[in-house]
């Protein structure tokens, strides 16, 4: 009976989040970057997170979600952990597994999206710069030979 009440609350808050995406998107954030930025502003009223994220094989990933949950609770937000086995958890998984209903609107979502894209581009360019490093090393070696070293 206790779990029925818990699941009913989770379903209710997930439905509220989904409605807010349609009606007040500036108060409905999802994805780790957006949610953590909202948390930095202490704007999270309800955090919705899927239990799978706490069982991730990557320790760093697990830790960042634990820290997010603790921080939201410290700031007075409600935290709802959804079972990945339940239909509501599967629905939350479709929007990245982490979402938040905000206390107040944060209208600079587009700016955050641009930052996220830049960050992804930076990571991609950093990962692809191994060839550049090798070429730079070759040029240094060549220059040193030319100078007689």
Image (cartoon, grey):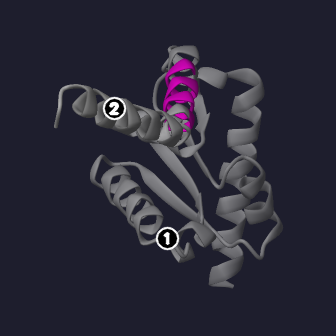
Q: Quadrant of the N terminus?
A: bottom right
Q: Tag 1, which secondary structure?
A: loop
Q: Position of residue 140 (x, y in %)?
A: 30, 32
Query: Which class describes the residues within 10 Å of circle 2: few (<14), some (14-19), or many (20+)?
Result: few
Residue 38 shows in this picture: no
Distance from Cα at disc 2 to Cα at disc 1:
42 Å
Determine the residue positioned at 58% across, 26% down: 117
**Is 92 part of what is drawn in magenta?**
no
Which of the numbered marks, if any, corresponds to residue 22? none
The residue beneath circle 2 is 142
**Boundaries of the magenta span:** 114-124
Q: Residue furthest bottom?
A: 1
Residue 31 versus residue 126: which sits nearer the camera?
A: 126
Q: Position of residue 31 (x, y in %)?
A: 59, 43
Q: Position of residue 115 (x, y in %)?
A: 49, 23
Q: Position of residue 58 (x, y in %)?
A: 49, 70
Determine the residue positioned at 41% across, 34% down: 37
Residue 35 versus residue 127: which sits nearer the camera?
A: 127
Residue 130 versus residue 1: which sits nearer the camera?
A: 130
The residue beneath circle 1 is 58
């Amino acid at each position: 009976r206790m779990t029925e009440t818990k699941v009913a609350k989770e379903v209710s808050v997930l439905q509220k989040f989904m409605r807010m995406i349609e009606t007040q998107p500036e108060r409905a954030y999802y994805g780790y970057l957006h949610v953590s930025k909202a948390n930095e502003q202490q704007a999270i009223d309800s955090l919705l997170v899927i239990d799978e994220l706490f069982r991730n094989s990557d320790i760093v990933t697990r830790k960042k979600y634990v820290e997010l949950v603790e921080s939201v609770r410290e700031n007075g937000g409600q935290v709802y952990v959804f079972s990945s086995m339940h239909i509501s958890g599967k629905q939350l998984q479709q929007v990245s597994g982490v979402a938040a209903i905000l206390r107040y609107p944060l209208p600079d979502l587009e700016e955050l999206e641009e930052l996220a894209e830049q960050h992804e581009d930076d990571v991609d360019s950093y990962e692809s710069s191994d060839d550049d490093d090798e070429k730079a090393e070759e040029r240094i070696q060549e220059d040193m030979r030319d100078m007689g070293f």
